[in-house]
Amino acid sequence: MGFDQYHEPPQELPERTRTFARLCASLTEEAEAIGWYEQRLAVETDREARAIMLDAQGEEFKHFCMDLEFLLRQTPLWREIARGILLQEGDIVEHGEESEEAAVEGAAERGAPVAGSNSLGLGSLRGVAS
Amino acid sequence: MSHLLREHAPITTEGWQRIDDEARERLAPALAARKLVDFAGPRGWQHSATALGRVQPLTMTPGRGITAATRQVLPLVEMRAGFAVARAELAAGDRGAEDVDFDDLDRAAQQLATAENAAVFHGWKAVGIVGVAEASAHDPITLGDDCERYPRHVAKAIELLLTAGIDGPYGLALGPEAHTRVLETSEHGGYPLLEHLREILAGPLVWAPGVDGAVVVSMRGGDFLFESGEDISIGYEQHDADAVRLYLEESFSFRVVTPEAAVPLA
């Protein structure tokens, strides 16, 4: 079994980061599978075979979404950026630029932890009730 | 692996989660300075000093015709508060116990927050930190024990700030004794003193362990600068058969840019 999902020596990575990397690899595999079914469906003419593949692709949609939701829950900044882009009407690139700017600036203002930090993430407490 | 060596502790992922959650819960109410002053960072554990943008001219130079100066910086201070957690309590937490004994962690969290507040408001000479109260350009207003007079004192402090051209909103850091008196007091007519003070300030009133008396500060921004290197984190020290020794740690510097922007109430 390979350990290709790790870019750094696994023994040096915290458990949380290893889990994160596994789910990133899983997300990639689900996206690949969605693409493969899309191609098969484009050329398949047998009705029953198409129905099976559509059902299988639906499974991959579900897996992809579950992987993504897990990763977003682990990464507040990613979640914040995704919130401004996913399931929105309008210009995707524009939403992306605006969402990233707002989320990154907001995180910096709140004193969000440096990437990879183990801090408690307290930062500024302005606006927190006494 | 980070210098906190968390991976060496005999603590499960869920156990670490419980410890971190408990620490956050205990620290947040007590970290008064972070509710009132500007917070920059965290810059990371490797960040060692805050640049002040000033130089100290040198009289001795290694060559003729040379002028030289050293850059002035404010070093970050590392602050730690150790605590222990019984391994039996960690195991109980892993089995689902809701009442894990984190008393020693709670004590350490209170100590660290109190020290941070004391450094910000009253200074720490050994590390070059001048506190908000001691840097103030205004004479202290006597607070006294009669808290029905507190609104008058706070209003006077705000008048001093306005006269000096310092805008609001304003915040009030209240030491524990003064805070308790405020909470216990209703003015004539039963109106809570706490609410009256908040209305005068148009800003927060904060419980501030480590503060003697009280301090009114402007919260317009740019006057009081807290720079975080490593924000408060929990690291691993050692363990034996009975307990795991951990510590809360942070690194920071603090400086007052506008001494006119605060009034101490002693």
Image: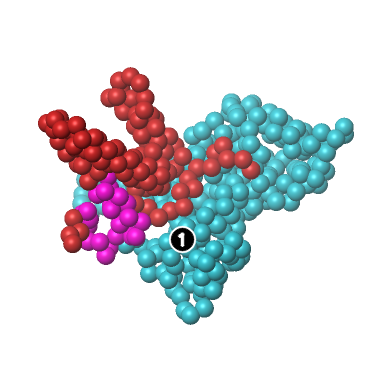
Q: Colour of chain A?
A: red
Name which residue lies at 53% across and 53% down: B24
Picture residue at 52% right of the left edge, 55% below the top: B21
Image coordinates of residue B181 in percent, x first then y, are 78, 47
Which quarter of the figure has residue A1?
A: bottom left
Residue identifier under label 1: B14
Up-down relation of residue B110 to residue A83 (above or below) = below
Tell me where residue B86 appears, x and y as whole percent.
Answer: 54, 72
Magenta stretch bounds: A5-27
In the rendering, at what x and y percent does residue B169 appear?
60, 29
Residue A106 seen: yes
Amino acid at dot 1: Glu
Residue drawn at (39%, 38%), measured in percent from left and top? A79
Magenta segment, prevailing SS (helix, strand or loop): helix
**Does the segment drawn in magenta span residue A26?**
yes
Report the residue at 15% width, 33% height from top: A46
Image location of residue B126, percent across then percent down: 50, 58
Which corner quadrant holds the N terminus of chain B? bottom left
Chain that is coloured cyan in the picture: B
Taking the image as shown, residue B235 lies to the left or right of residue B155, namely left
Residue A66 versus residue B191 in the image, above or below: below
